Image (cartoon, grey):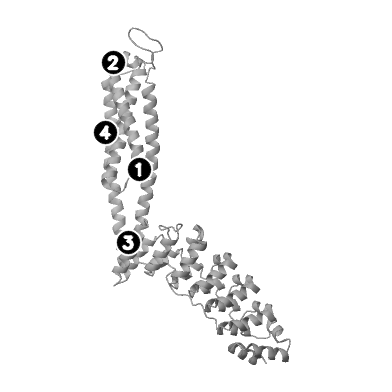
Amino acid sequence: MEQKLCEAAIRGSVDSLHQLIAEDELILDKIVVGYFGGKSPLHVAASSGRTKFVKELLRLNPKLADVLDSRHQSALHIASAEGHVEMVQALTRVRPRMCIELDQEGRNPLHLAAMNGNVEVLKELIQVKPQATRGRVDGGETILHLCVKHNQVKALELLLKSCGDMAFVNAKDRGGNTILHLAVLDSKIEIVKCVLTNSAFIDVNGKNESGHTAMDILFLARSLSGGQEDLDCDIEDVLQQARAMRSKDLERHVSLENESNGLMVVASLIATIAFQAGVTPPGGTWQDDSNEHRAGDSIMAYKYPNAYPYFLHFNTIGFIISLSTILLLLHKLPSRTRLLVWIRAVIAWLTVLAVTFTYAYSITVITPKKYSHSPSHDIVVVIIVWVSLMSIFVFTRPIGAIRRQRRTNKAVERIFKFGIRIPAGGAQPIQGGNSV
């Protein structure tokens, strides 16, 4: 009797089904309680594409949709893998919760549909259970990872557009690899373009557990493979357009960003100080009018006529340079070029120098005569301190550069001695799809 039912399922003969039920009214109930140890007639009909037969079975006994075969797969798993849209619709109407049922390898029906590129089936399943897209298989991959590994561009595009939030798009497998890492590692340029085009949330400079970005993986893979220079160059161009960087360049970029932010704070502070010193000079201002001065005039200009012009000049220089620095930083100029880095360093030193001399002249004015020294003495002290600081700066930078170069040389020697290790999580295809 059981064999006849399976044969009817293979043929899709609804009449034979009715005849068998007439002979044994409990035959479908026996299937539900586990009478068959392997595949149920619903599984057989699903794998054979017999949609009409499947609909009739579900009408007679909807509980058949809950039955799992020896691989822990439901009929919905099989229909999704085979791409039978109408059958999937019938199964999900009866048991929508089967969308999140996992087989032996931790895959739900959406995983199987994506792996086999069944886009229309995937659309139906997403509408029924969108949360099922967040499930991970036993290897730690998301449904997006499976699309990349099986080169399913259309399915990946659908998922990125329909439910591609930041956490989902940048999810990592057990090796810490995102979908962009895997696409670059396998030199799948269409996948790379799809990811970068259809998702605004992808972190193009995200790192895996080995500390490698997608651009790092491209260079590592290029060094180990031959004959793919043109393809790798195309991928490199696409990544560069998305502003992807190698990890060492990324660290330098972050360092420059932090340096720019710090310089912005310092420039703003110096501009504030210079402005305050300009409108409220040391010694204050006259509060009344007379034949010799007006109210608001700087007392320092009358009491120290020789020092005041220098104070005014250096304070103005510091103020203007600080404002110029703020404008340069706001325009986000490419600070990685050597010329701009050098110009920015010179501007910073000139600003500090101007503030230093402004401070020296201010102290000279407000210090009582019994505690003050000659101006030449103050200038000598400033020059000595300044030369000392510059000497330390000049001599320590080459030493640091030499040490960094030595570390780089040692790293290169280790690479050539032991070889380059590609990060875990390479593109090893997962067997999926057909269950029968």
- Crowd band around label 2 with a 10 angstrom C-alpha radius: few (<14), some (14–19), many (20+): few
- C-alpha distance separating marks 1 and 2: 40 Å
Position of the N terminus, as image quadrant, is: bottom right
Question: Are the residues tagged 4 and 1 within 8 Å (C-beta)?
Answer: no
- Judged from the image, the secondary structure of the residue bearing numbered disc 3 is helix
Residue wearing tag 2: 305
In whole angstroms, how far apart are the C-alphas of marks 2 and 3? 63 Å
Location of mark 1 (residue) = 331
Q: Name which residue type carries label 2.
A: Pro
Determine contact: label 1, label 2, CB under 8 Å.
Answer: no
Q: Give whichever of 5, 250 is nearer the camera.
A: 5
Q: Earlier in the sequence, mark 1 or mark 2?
A: 2
Who is closer to the viewer here, 340 or 125? Answer: 125
Q: Is residue 108 above or below residue 246?
A: below
Q: Mark 1 Cα within 10 Å, few/some/many (few <14, many 20+)? A: few
Q: Let me know if residue 137 appears in the view.
A: no
For disc 4, the marked residue is 387
